Image: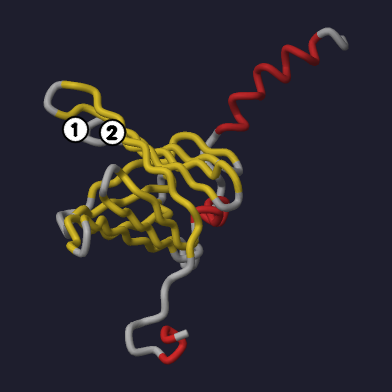
Amino acid sequence: MHSLLPVSLLVAAPLLAQAPASISDLAWIAGSWAGSLGRAQVEEHWLTPSGGAMLGMSRTLAGEKMVMFEFLRIETRPDGVYYVAQPNGRPPTGFKLTRSSPKLAVFENPQHDHPKIITYELTDPQSLTATIEGDQGGKNRKTVFQFKRTKLPPPAGDPSARR
């Protein structure tokens, strides 16, 4: 009977990577994150889970010019948890959470051209890696964003900004 234990653990192991029961399992994504991609500066800001959703936004700056922005959300739907992206204000595209762990979330939409897969991984408490991959121009393309945790700067004109 004891010889079955290792086999049962191997069978149960894939279940550990299933989608979370609650969006609160993704709270580790919340916060302000910044990184660079080539010469561009990229920021993502995520609110903590509340009301069945996390709201986020990103912007990409080339010098002093914003070259891209995106409205983001992670939301609970009847059939699972979805990452919803609206690049440059376009209509929303949903990606279903297909795998997760305490520091990893993989969202997929096989019908979308690029990206098909969006992955977030907390590599340490101050570092977040976001990866997008999928078909673009008939070729598989993968882009990796390395973010560090940041704080939002005070608004212009705020007396604390003059320190």
To which residue does mark 1 refer? 113
Q: CA distance from mark 1 to mark 2?
A: 6 Å
99 left or right, relative to 72: right
> Which colour style is shown?
secondary structure
For label 1, the crowd category at 10 Å Cα-Cα, with few meaning under 14, some 14 to 19 and many 20 or more, is some
How many discs appear?
A: 2
* Contact? badges 1 and 2 (CB < 8 Å): yes
Residue farthest along the front direction in this orientation? 163
Q: What label sits on residue 54 in the rendered view? A: none
Question: Residue at horizontal 53%, vertical 48%?
Answer: 127
Q: Position of residue 151 (x, y in %)?
A: 48, 68
Q: Secondary structure at mark 1?
A: loop
Does 10 appear above or below 31? above
Does 113 appear above or below 49? above
Q: Position of residue 121 (x, y in %)?
A: 50, 41
Q: Position of residue 104 (x, y in %)?
A: 53, 40
Residue farthest along the left direction in this orientation? 137
Q: Secondary structure at mark 2?
A: loop
Specify the amino acid type for callout 1.
Asp
Question: Residue at horizontal 19%, vertical 33%?
Answer: 113
Q: Position of residue 26 (x, y in %)?
A: 53, 51
Image quadrant holding the N terminus, namely top right
For label 2, the crowd category at 10 Å Cα-Cα, with few meaning under 14, some 14 to 19 and many 20 or more, is some
Question: Residue at horizontal 41%, vertical 50%?
Answer: 78
**Residue 98, located in which quarter of the rendered image?**
top left
The front one of 93 and 7 is 93
Specify the amino acid type for callout 2.
Lys
To which residue does mark 2 refer? 116
16 left or right, relative to 44: right
Does 149 appear above or below 153? above
